Image (spheres, coloured by chain):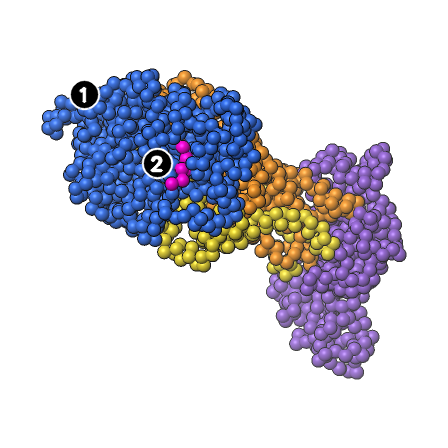
Chain colours: A blue, B yellow, C orange, D purple
Amino acid sequence: MSELQLPPSRGLSRRRFLGGLAGSALLLAGCGGGEGSSRANRTFANEAEKWRQYDGFKLTFVTENTPPSTGIKQLVDRGDFKNLTGIDVEILQQDLPVMLQKAELDLRSGGTTYDLIYAQDKPVTSVLADYLEDLRPYMEDDSLPQADGGYDEGTWYPNYLDVASYAYSDRLISLPYDAADAVFCYRRDLFEQYAGQFQSEFGYPMQYGPDTTWKNVLDFATFFNRLNASDPTVPYGMGLHLGQFAWTTQLDVQRMLYSHGQWREFDIDDVQGSKDPGATRWGDDQSIRGLELYKALFDQSTPDALSLGTVEVADAYNAGKIAMLTQYHEFAASFEDPANAGGGGRTAYDVCPKGDRQYLAGNGELVNGTNCGIGGISINAAASEDQKRAAYMFAVWATNVENQAENLKISGGTPTRLAVGDRPEVEQAQGQPYGTGDTGRVGPSQYPNALTFPAVTVGMADPNAVLGPKIPKFNQYVTIVANEIQAMCAGNSDPEATAKVIQSRTDELHGA
Amino acid sequence: MAVDTATPGAVLGTPRPNTPRARRYLAPLLLPAVILLALLSIYPFVWLIYMSFHAVGLAPGAPSEFVGLDNWQRMFTDSQYWASWGVLARYSVVSMVLEVGLGTLLAILLNRSKHEKLLITVLLMPMMMAPVVAGLLWQYLYNGTFGWYFWGLRSVGLLDEGTILGSADTALWAIVAVDVWEWTPLVALIVLSGLKLVPQDQLEASWMDGAGPVRSFFQVALPSIKGSLMIAILLRFMDNIRIIDHFIALTGGGPANSTKVLPLYLYEQSFSFFELGYGASIALTLLLVTILFGKLVVNRFEEREPRPSKKDEELV
Amino acid sequence: MTTNPRTGTRDDVTQVQDDRADVRGDDLLPGPAVDARDQVVRGRGSRIAGVVITAFLGLYVIWTLVPFYIMITSSFKASDAAFALPPEGDWGGAVSQLFVFSPTTEHYRGLFAQGEFERYFTNSVVAAVASAVISVVFGTTAAYAISRGRFRGKRDLYFWIISTRMAPVVAVTVPLYAIFKNFALLNTLPALILAYTVFNLPFAIWILKGFFDSVSYEIEEAYMVDGHSRWQALWKIIPLVAPGLAAVVVLCILLAWNDFIFAAVMGGEAAKTLPVATQGLKSASGIEWGQIMAAGVVTVAPMLLLGIVIRKYMVQGLTMGAVKQ
Amino acid sequence: MASLTFNGVWKRYDQVEAVKDLNLAVADGEFLCLLGPSGCGKSSSLRMIAGLEFISDGDILLDDRRINDLEPRHRDIAMVFESYALYPTKTVFENMANPLRLRKLSKDEIDRRVRETARILEIERLLNRRPSQLSGGQKQRVAIGRVLVREPQAFLFDEPIAHLDAKLRARMRGELKHIQKTLGTTTVYVTHDQLEGMSMADRMAIMREGVLQQVGTPHEVFNRPTNVWVATFVGDPPMNILNAEVQAADGGLVARAPEYTITIPAQQAAALSSARLTDNKVQIGVRPEALTLSSVRDPQHPIAGRIYAVQPLGDVEIVDVRVGDDRILVRTELGTISNEDMNAPVFLGYKPEKLYFFDAVSGQAVY
C-alpha cells in the first residue's frame, strides 16, 4: 500500500512513534508554517523589511563540496546574504557520503546542528524525508519573502522540482539549487580525425546525435580500443562510473536500462517513490539485456575501468585516456580547461545515447535515458520555528534566478532555474551546435557548463528522464547494485546471474 | 642472568606496600582512572549488548524497538558477514606473513648495520603517518591516471590490465602493500629487540661448535626471538581488526566487496545505513575475537616480563 | 642470597640491578650487541654478504621514503600538467617529472586561505593534547597504584584495562556515538577527547606501569624513612619516570592526532580534525591531489617531528612496551 | 638513641605468617644482628621497625613509646636498604643532605655534616657524582652516609653489604662495627650471612620461618646453640651432624651407628637419659675443628671413613670424609692430607667434651 494516500494523522502518529524530540518537533511542524512564531503573520512595510526580520540570526548549512555550493559560499562570504538579511550563514562543505552521514546522524536523532541541509534527491531525501520540513506553508506565507517568478513547475529545469522536492508524499521538502545531470561527452576532434576510418570499418558515419544509440556507442568504443591496441596514444573507448561511490554506478547502469523501454527498478511512482517498494524488476529479461550491454561497454573501456569512479573517470578523460563518457554536466567546466586533452573546444556535449533495439527485450519505447542528482535545499524540521523561517529565506535567496546566474559566473555552477538559461550571455555561452541533432554543443564558452544546457533541457524532460527510485533503503540498494555490477565486470559472474543476485538481495532487503 | 638494561626494566619483586594503610592511599590513586575507564568502556559495552537486541532509533528518549534475536539471526545468515570474515582473515594472514618475513630479515640486517640508529629513524616515519593520510597517499600512488606506482608497474610490465585498486584480484593485495609499508618496521623493531636479548655466550658457543651464521640463527637466535615474533604477530592481528582507515581511504570496501573486511562492514552498517542494532551484533562478535586475541597478547607480555614467583602469587 | 617472605625473588633482582650498576661504574664489560656485530660482520660475513645487506637496506629505505618524497613534491607542484605521467616506459621522462618542476605553494595557500585549516589544526591540537593530558594524569596515578599495590583481582583489572586499548575502534564508536548523543556531546571537542581517552588511558596505564615497575620501591621507602610523607615520596619519584611520561604524552598525542573514525563520526564541523579534513578534500566533482598531498604534509609533519624527538620511546610505545631500548 | 622492644609481634600476609610472636629487646646502643635464611621474617621485622610494614599484632616500642601507628617519617629511624635505594636523580651530596634538609638544618650545618660524614666514609671526592656513576661499593658507602648524617634514634641495616665482593665485605664489616661503636647508636642489622653476625654483632637474634630461635652473644650462640638448626646455621664450615641411636652400655650411654660407637660423656648422658628421646634417636653434632684425623685406627680415632676430597685453605685445610652415607668435614693443619690420599681409608677422632647432642625429632639441644 502506498504511503501517498495516508491521512496526515497517521503520518504524525508514525513519527511520534519515532519518539523523542524529533517527534515533538515534527508535531510542531505539522501544525503549519506560521503558528507559534512571534514573527509569523506580521505585516511588513516593504520587501526589504521582510528580508530583515531575522536580523542577527545564525544559520548552519551542511552541503556537498561541489562547485555550485562553493559558489554559494562565495556569495555568502562576500556578504550578499548578510547585507540583505542580517543573517549569518555558516556553510559546511563535505564529501557527499560524509555529508550524508553527518546530516543523517543529526536529523535522525532530532538534532538541530544543521538548519539547512543539502538534500541530494535520492541519497538524502529518500532517506531523510520524514525529518525535512514541508515548505508549502512557507511558500504561501505573506510574511516571508518569496522567489521571483514563483515556484511553478515551469520555472525550473524540467523535472528538477519533482526529483528534488518529493518523497512518499506531496510534501514539498526542498528547493532545487544545484544539479548534476548526465550528458554525453565525447572528443569531437577524434571523431573528426577518424571519421573516414570508422566509416570504412563499420559502414556508417561516426557522428553523434540524439538518435545515436548505445549500440553505436559500443561500436565507437570498440573502434577506439582497436586503435589503442596498435597506438597507445589513441584513447580507449568508453568511460564508466565504477569506482568507490555506489550511487553513481547505479546511475550509470540505470540510464542505460531506462533507454530500453523505460525500464525501472521498482513498480513504484517515479516521483514520490514508496516506503514499501515491493519486489524489484531486476532479474527480468530487460535487466539481463541491459547488463549484457553494460558488460560489453566495460570490455571496450579502459583496462582500469573498475577503479574509476565519477571523479577518476573525469581525470582519465582529461588526461586523454578515454574518448567518450556519460558525465554530469557540472564537469564541463573542468573538461573545457585548455590544458586538458578534451579542453579548448575539443569536447562536444550532447544528450545521452538512445536505447537500441538490439538490446530491447519486448517492445517498449527507446529513449535517451537520462538521470541526475539534483541538490535541493531542505530545512531541518526539528529546528525552531524562527530558525526554520530564517532558513526558508536562505533557500529562497539561494535558488532565485539572480543568484543562480551569479553562481554560474562565479563557480561554473549548474543553475536550476530556466530563466538563467534565457539570459543573453548564458544563451550565448551555450556554444555552437554540433553533431546530428539540435542538442549537441561545442565550445569554447564563457560559462562552460552552459554548453550542456541544450542537452540537459532535453535529457531531463520526459520521456527521457528517470527520477527514482525513491526508497528509504536507497543507499543499501545502490550498494547492492554497485557491488554486483563490479563483480560482473571483474568477471566473477555473467549478466544473467548478476541480475538475479541483485534481484534476490534487493528483495531480501525489502522483505519482498 | 641476562639483564635488560632498559630504564623501565623488568625489575620484579620490588617490595610492594600492602598494609591496610597502603590500600587506603592506593585506592584514591587507582579509582579515578578505573571509574573513568569504566564509564568509557563498560557502560558502552552494556549499551552495545542492549543495542544488539534492538532496532535502534537515533532519536533520544525511548526510540529502540526490542527485536529479540533478529539482529543475531540476520548476522548468522548474512553471507556478506561471513565473506567479510574471510576477507579479514585473508588480509591479516597475508600481511602478517609478509610483515614478519620482511621484518625479521630487516631486523637481522639492522642488528648488523653500523647505521642502526639512523635507519630506525627512517623506518619509524611511516608509522607516524595518520593511516587515513597513508591511505590517501597510496591511493594517489595507485591512481590509474596520476599514480607513479601504477606507472611504474605498467612500465616494468608487471601490470597488464586494469588498475591496482580497480581489480578485485589486486585491490586487497594493494592494501596489504600499504600495511606492509606502514607497519613492517614495527615488526622489525620488535624482532630487533628480541635479537638484542640473544645471549651472546650461546651464540659464541654455537660458533665454537662450528655453526655458520644461518645455522646459529636457527639454533640460537630464533628460539630467543620467538616470543618477540609472537608479540609482533598478535599486535598486528589486533590492529588489523582495530583500524580500517586504509580501507576507507583506498577502496571503501570495493571493488565488488573484495576489500570489505568485517570492521569496515560494521562501519558501513552502522554509519552508512544506520543499522546500529545490527552493527552492535557485529561489533560484539568482533570484540569477542579481540578479547581472545587480547588474552593471548597479555599472556605473551607477561611471559616476557618475568612475573613474581609463585610464592609471591600466593600472597596476592 | 636471601628471599624474604614478601617477595620470592626479590633478592635476585636487587642483585641484578647492582651488578648492572657495577658494570656501568667500572666499565668492565662491553655491550654484547656491539660485540656481536663486530664478530658477525667482520669475522663471519663475507664482503659479498656486506654488499647484499647494504643493497637490501638501501632498497628498503627507498621503498619507505619514496611515498614521502612523492607526497612532499606533489604538494608543491602546480596542478594539471605537473601531475601528468610520462608515457609508460619513459624512464627519462619520469626522472625529469619527479625531480624537475617549479615549486609552488599554491596548495598550501589554498588550504589556509579560508581560515578553515587553521581551525582544523587547532582542533587536532586541542583534542590530542587534552586527551593526552587527561590520560597521563589519571594514567600515572593508576599505573602507580597497580605497580605498587597488591590486591585481589589485580590481574583481571589489568587485563580489562589493556583489553580496552585493544578494542576495535568501530566497535567502540557504535555505542559511544549513542551515548554521546544522549549527553549532547556530539560534534564537540569534548566528545573526541573522551573517545581518545578510551584508548589513551589504558595505554598510558600499561606503559607507565612498566616505568614504575622499574623504579625500586625501596627508593620511596628511603624517602619515607628520610622524613617524607607517602605523598611526598610518590611525588619525589615522578622525575624518575619522567622519560616515560614524556613518551606517553607524545604517543597519546600521536594516537589521537592520527585518528580518523572517531573524528569522522563524532567530530562534526565544530571538531573537525586534520585527517578528516584531508579526507574531506576528496569531492564528487574532482580530486585536487596537490591539495590533498599538502594537507597530508600538514597532518604528518608535526608527528614526524615529535616522533624523531622521542624516537627511543616511540618504539617502546608503538609496541605497547614489548620493546624497550 | 633509644632501646627497641618487640612485644609479641606478628606479621601476617594474607595466609602467610611471616613473623610469629616475636619478643625481643634491643638495648640502647646495642648492635643487634637479625640473622636467618631467606624467608625467615627478619626483613619483615626490620621493616616493621621502620614503619614500612604494618604490624599485624603486638607492639613495637622505641624506648617506652609505642610506635606502631607512627608514619616512618615520624619515627626518627634511619635505614640502609639492600638495594641502597639512592635517589637516582640527585648527586651524592644531595642524597646525603636530603634527610637534613627535611629537618630544616641550616645550609652550613648540612654542608658541615655531609662533608664530615663523607670524610669518615672516604667518599668526599664522589660528592658531586650521581648514583649511576658509582660502583657498588661506593653506592653502599653513600647509602650508609645518608644514614650516618642523621644521628637518629636507631640505625636499621637491611643486608647492606650482601652484594659486595668478599674482600670488600670483610673490610666493610670492620668499618661498620667501628662506626657503630664510635657513635653508639642502637642498631638492628639484618643479614643472612652468619659471618656478619658473628663478627659484628653484640648479640644475634636468629630467626627461622618467622620464629625466633635464639638470642645471644655470638659466643653463646656458637657454643651453646639451642637446637640443631641454629648449630648448623652458625659456623663455617658448618657443624657436622651424625645420626645415631642411644644405647645403654657399661652403666653409661653410647651412641651407636653401623660404623662407630661413641661413648657419651657422663654429664650429657645424664641429660640425655632425662630427656625423653623418641626411639632413642639422637643427632650428634661436632664442629669440623673439633675432629682429628689419623691414618690408622686407634682409640683416639675410632671412626672409620674414606677420604673424599681435600680443600687446602692456606693455613688450614678442610677434609671431606665419608663415613657410611654421612659426609663429615674436618678442619686440620695444612698438609695433613694430600691430594694423593683420595679414597684412602682414614680414621676420625673427636674430643668428647666438644660433642653436642640433639633430640633427633625435636632438634632441641640436650645439655
For the point 32% across and 17% down, the residue is A424
* C-alpha span from label 2 to label 1: 40 Å
Report the side of C268 relative to B161 (left or right). Answer: right
Q: Chain of mark 1?
A: A
Q: Residue at x 45, y 42 (%)?
A: A131
Determine if residue B107 is in view. Answer: no
Chain letter for mark 2, please: A
Which class describes the residues within 10 Å of circle 1: few (<14), some (14-19), or many (20+)?
Answer: few
Closest to the observer, A435 or D197: A435
Residue drawn 40% across the image and 54% down it: B75
Residue D358 lies in quadrant: bottom right
Q: Nearer the viewer, residue A495 or D227?
A: A495
**Mark 2 — residue?**
A163
Q: Is residue A431 visible?
A: yes
Q: Which residue is mark 1?
A: A193
> With B310 as the anchor, is A492 left or right in this view?
left
- Residue C97 shown left or right of residue D270 in the figure: left
